[in-house]
Amino acid sequence: MKPLALRFKGGWLFKPEQVSLTAAVALIAIFVTTCTTPPAKQDNMFTSKRHGYSVIISSGWSMHETPGEWVLGSQPRDGTPGVDAFFWNKSLDRTIVVVALPLADGTSLEAWAKDVASITPSQCTTDSTVPSTLGGERAQLWDIHCEDGAEVFKIAAVHKGRGYLLVFLSLAKFDPADRDLFASVMRTFTFTE
């Protein structure tokens, strides 16, 4: 039996004709949620009082909070109002951003995920979207590739009437370690309210 392959930038992990789409998506979800990258030390924990979350970021990263409130529909980037941005200090080509917004009463994860999916730039394509968890809440996870070579992972969750979005952006050539890093950050994310 030939080894399975799933297309990633620069290679195959599973061949589509050998694995059903459902099985491939399930394998991606398992991969992202079970990575073995060790979590960062507790002294690198960041707690956002305005957004009500804590996350552990490994050493080598710095953080910048932009005052204000993020507006749904705008790209969440450093400098955008309401964005918490984390930067890899060795190069500015990797960023993690977190935003949160109050939602209308009864807004479901599915409705929030649809809103969040709509802000994917037109030059980017979503390779997969799978159910996941964030801070113990149900979540939706996307794996996105852009024409300019950027790799994006984003995850959306709803907690106590607020919509949360955590995005990892790599402008560098795809590196499998980016997927591990994003998974390790997701595992340390907790809601504080």
Image (cartoon, rainbow, N blue to C red):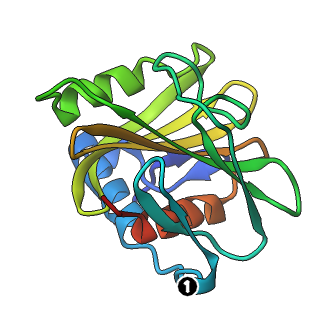
- Quadrant (top left, top right, bottom left, bottom right) of the N terminus: bottom left
Q: Quick check: 51 left or right of 75?
A: left
Q: Quick check: 86 left or right of 83?
A: right
Q: Residue furthest right?
A: 90
- Quadrant (top left, top right, bottom left, bottom right) of the C terminus: bottom left
Q: Quick check: 158 left or right of 178?
A: left
Residue 81, placed above or below residue 96: above
User: Where in the figure is residue 28, as x and y percent of width and height?
Assistant: 37, 55
User: Where in the figure is residue 170, as x and y percent of width and height?
Assistant: 70, 46
Closer to us: 133 or 76: 76
| Residue 19 appears in the picture as rendered | no
Residue 135, placed above or below residue 93: below
User: Where in the figure is residue 103, as x and y percent of width and height?
Assistant: 27, 28
| Residue 101 appears in the picture as rendered | yes
Closer to us: 146 or 115: 115
Q: Which residue is mark 1?
A: 42
Closer to us: 148 or 168: 168
> At 28% across and 53% down in the image, what residue appears?
132
Q: Amino acid at mark 1?
A: Gln
Closer to us: 39 or 83: 83
Residue 116 falls in image quadrant: top left
Q: Secondary structure at mark 1?
A: helix
Residue 110 falls in image quadrant: top left
Label 1 packing within 10 angstroms: few (<14), some (14-19), many (20+): few
User: Where in the figure is residue 145, as x and y percent of width and height?
Assistant: 59, 34
> At 53% across and 35% down in the image, what residue appears?
144
